[in-house]
Image (cartoon, grey):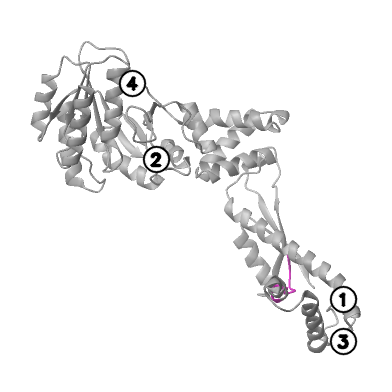
Amino acid sequence: MKTQKFIGSTLKEVTEQMKKELGENAIIMNTRKVNQGGMFSFLKKDLLEVTATVEDLSNEISEIENINSSKTSFDDFLFNRIAADENGNKQNETKRKFTFPQINNEENKTQTSSSEISQIKGELDDVRSTLKEIVEQLKYSKMPSLPDNLKKHFITLVAQDVNEQIAANIVQKIYGQLSGDELSDSSVVENRLIDEISKIIMTVSSSQQKLNRAKILAFVGPTGVGKTTTIAKIAAINKLFNGFSVALISADTYRIAAIEQLRTFAAIANIEMEVVYRPGEVQKAIKKHRSKDLIIIDTFGRGQREEKGLSQLKKFIEAAEPDEVHLVLSAAATEKTMLDICERFDITKPNRLVFSKVDECVTFGQMLNLLYKIRIPISYITMGQTVPEDIVNADSKKIANMIYRSVIYDV
């Protein structure tokens, strides 16, 4: 058995060295990370050390793992294996030496195989452990060299779908801020982690003070994200709890059901409502209700790839001259989809984000990844269809907690 160690920056690099030196039949026996050393070693990428051998245990391992589903006993397997070694490999003096048992002597066969069982099981456990380490090395290849407690938090962030580089930046900041004793305290690290995440999240609350004119809010976004339901919730809260006089304007004339839904709500809540079909009608509707405290505009949904529809939507927004333009995003969408929506709806100049449907999410890391790139504050979080419940003002600490622990927003 020829054993040799190889060191490189990536598993691919080390594997190529191994195959060049030991041949295609070489197998990995052990891996470990090697710190490059130095004062700022935690900022450097660790090297990977691989211990390899040319002995091929793959067939033996495969046969052992299939024993449980085979009618042949483990002792019979070893007996057959020993016989094969004796008959086919006599010329190889480096092979293991076994005492060949008598075929009909069950007692001798049991005594011979017991030590071999332990040895092969041990080898199998070693290989499984090695494979697990390799998987972890590949899965978290960008993870910096960190204390074990910080590594756990790094892995938790990645498991919540936070981008690896963003997660690495967060834990590195914490590493530089805390002392040795603090780093070993999980509660201290977790609280600091929530603080760092919350610094990435910008939020803004709508003013609850009445102005000397009507405040205009417009809501935009792709189809099916819950704009109309969100508007109904905000209108109800401002009228019932804040004492505002409210008017609704619907430009969503492409969906009759949406108009009827909003009209039914407006009738129940005793809120005046207007329907506009062209951009030129928007200012007329606004002037009609200029004595109100709040005017909320519901717009038609458009897919972010519908350039003609987005151009038309832009004309409605420009005609309304709103104080706030809320872009509604489904939190259940992928980071790539949300980023594309933000870029294409930028034509409407949104200055607020609303994350809807958080109750449909498994993880929330995609929200943090988006907010790291799109510096627009969050105004509301919604998590259901109930009006006026299932909506809360955005709070950076609560959102950070939601992202890290993967729990629905703590109202």
Q: Is residue 255 left or right of residue 221?
A: left
Q: Amino acid at mark 4?
A: Ser
Mark 4 element type: loop
In magenta, the rendered stretch is 51-59
Q: Earlier in the sequence, mark 3 or mark 1?
A: 3
Disc on res. 331: 2
In the displayed structure, 210 sits above or below 345; it is: above
Residue 127 shows in this picture: yes
The Cα–Cα distance between marks 3 and 4, rounded to whole angstroms, is: 87 Å
Q: Amino acid at mark 3?
A: Asn
Disc on res. 206: 4
Q: Earlier in the sequence, mark 2 or mark 3?
A: 3
**Magenta span has 55?**
yes
Which residue is more in the foreground, 69 or 148?
69
Residue depth check, mark 1 versus mark 4: number of the one nearer the observer = 1
Q: Quadrant of the N terminus?
A: bottom right
Q: Residue at x 46, y 40 (%)?
A: 364
Q: Which residue is mark 3?
A: 104
Q: Earlier in the sequence, mark 3 or mark 4?
A: 3
